Amino acid sequence: MSKNQELQARRDAAFARGLGNALPVYVERARNAELWDVEGRRYIDFGSGIAVLNTGHLHPRVQAAVAKQLEAFSHTCLMVTPYANAVELAEKLNRLAPGPTPKKAIFVTTGAEAVENCIKIARAHTGRSGVIAFGGGFHGRTFMAMALTGKVAPYKAGFGPFPPEVYHAPFPIAYHGVSVQDSLDALEHLFKFDIEPSRVAAIIIEPVMGEGGFYVAPPEFLQALRKLCDQHGILLVADEIQTGFARTGRMFAVEYAGIEPDLMTMAKSLAGGFPLAAVVGKAAIMDAPGPGGLGGTYAGSPIACAAALAVLEAIEQEGLCRRAEQIGVRMVGALKAAQASLPSIGEVRNLGAMVAMELVKNGDPHAPDADLTKALVKRAGEKGVVLLSCGIYGNVIRFLAPLTIPDELLQEGLGIVLEALRELTGGGVAKAVNA
Ligand SMILES: Cc1ncc(COP(=O)(O)O)c(C=O)c1O
């Protein structure tokens, strides 16, 4: 039994099966866009720990900032005796959040917690209870976040009942025949059939659907949502947990639409691997809940705040927004070129370095190939690339390489993925995908 196999057997015995696992690979160390397992095998990391490492594994600035903070103190609790780096980080995030309205922030520990707090704040401010989210969206695994999530299996099945007053509208996905107008019509139907707009506190949307399949919300849709929310006094919440911090070629993806959300969630790449999440929003809205209504024991850990300040410095000084655009162009070019000889690649799409390829049978958008997608993640892993899948139908490969990845590694990783796909499909029609 290899070391990886031995650990996998122990893992399976020790952890509940509800905790997913993409690859049976046990990591010993990692740097930038590469990691090495306990058997000394090297992997190119196209997953970034699910979009957490836009600045790569152990970015030197992050490592140094964390080491320095550890010399000082590791925890006092921001709600008891606060510290300067948390204040500095809140000020920076308030400045970076799109739009001219003055902002305020809170820190929490996970993305789901940020989503939960957005809804608390929205309800406290509006005095309304309803929340609208989108089919296929993912907002986390806690109860309100799970209710907002628009995918039953595996996230909601067996876990109900959910908090009431949550409604879903279809996300506009041109590839699946859902237009912007279809989605706007569906919202009007919700207002007609389910809840009057004057009882809706918030509409929450991922500007690029993450777990749901990397579908980009067209700018005109986000602009229309902004208008609709203004018309009815509804708060617009942008869930930028996966799209934030330069991933899409802008600090935040809503910048492409030129809109100002009322509230935003941030997590994942905010602190380069340290657990930190935030809600940033218009100051008057953020101040709606009373003192003590928001917070958490670990919320705004000083170590995570030090890491986050270093991440923001790296994004700015290393031009990572521009780099995300370059990575996107390069990857999409290579994947589209391969599409000609690989008909299982139904669509290639991106916003900056948030790149996806959707795998289908016979070039048919309505024939998702989830088996091939699963097999590709496995085969790429065996060949030394960490790859993630996603998608409403489980048939999308999402590429989330660190934005600090050197070109040669990007090229090498892409070559391996395409070679694996060719092996699985015989260069054309899918075969032996369950191998
Ligand atoms: C858009 C979005 N919202 C919320 C979450 C939940 O974040 P966490 O897993 O940190 O709770 C995720 C995680 O994948 C996400 O992508």
Image (cartoon, rainbow, N blue to C red):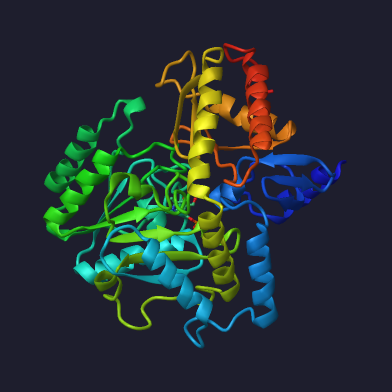
- Looking at the image, residue 100 sits to the left or right of residue 272; the answer is left
Q: Position of residue 261 (x, y in %)?
A: 28, 56
Q: Quadrant of residue 67?
A: bottom right
Residue 40 picture location, percent across and down: 84, 44
Numbered-mark total: 0
Looking at the image, which residue sits at the far right?
1
Q: Compare residues 47 and 282 and report the one nearer the observer.
A: 282
Image quadrant where one finds the N terminus? top right
Question: Percent position (x, y) of residue 41?
Answer: 81, 41
Residue shown at 26%/45% (left/top)? Answer: 222
Pick whichever, 283 or 153, lies toward us.
283
Q: Quick check: can you spot residue 430?
A: yes
Residue 103's x, y, as percent?
Answer: 32, 69
Q: Is residue 75 left or right of residue 148?
A: right
Q: Quadrant of the C terminus?
A: top right
Q: Is residue 344 shown to the viewer in this render? A: no
Q: Residue at x 24, y 73 (%)?
A: 284
Residue at 52 percent of width and 49 percent of height:
320
Residue 26 falls left or right of residue 363: right
In front of the other: 211 or 399: 399
Q: Is residue 333 above or below residue 185?
A: above
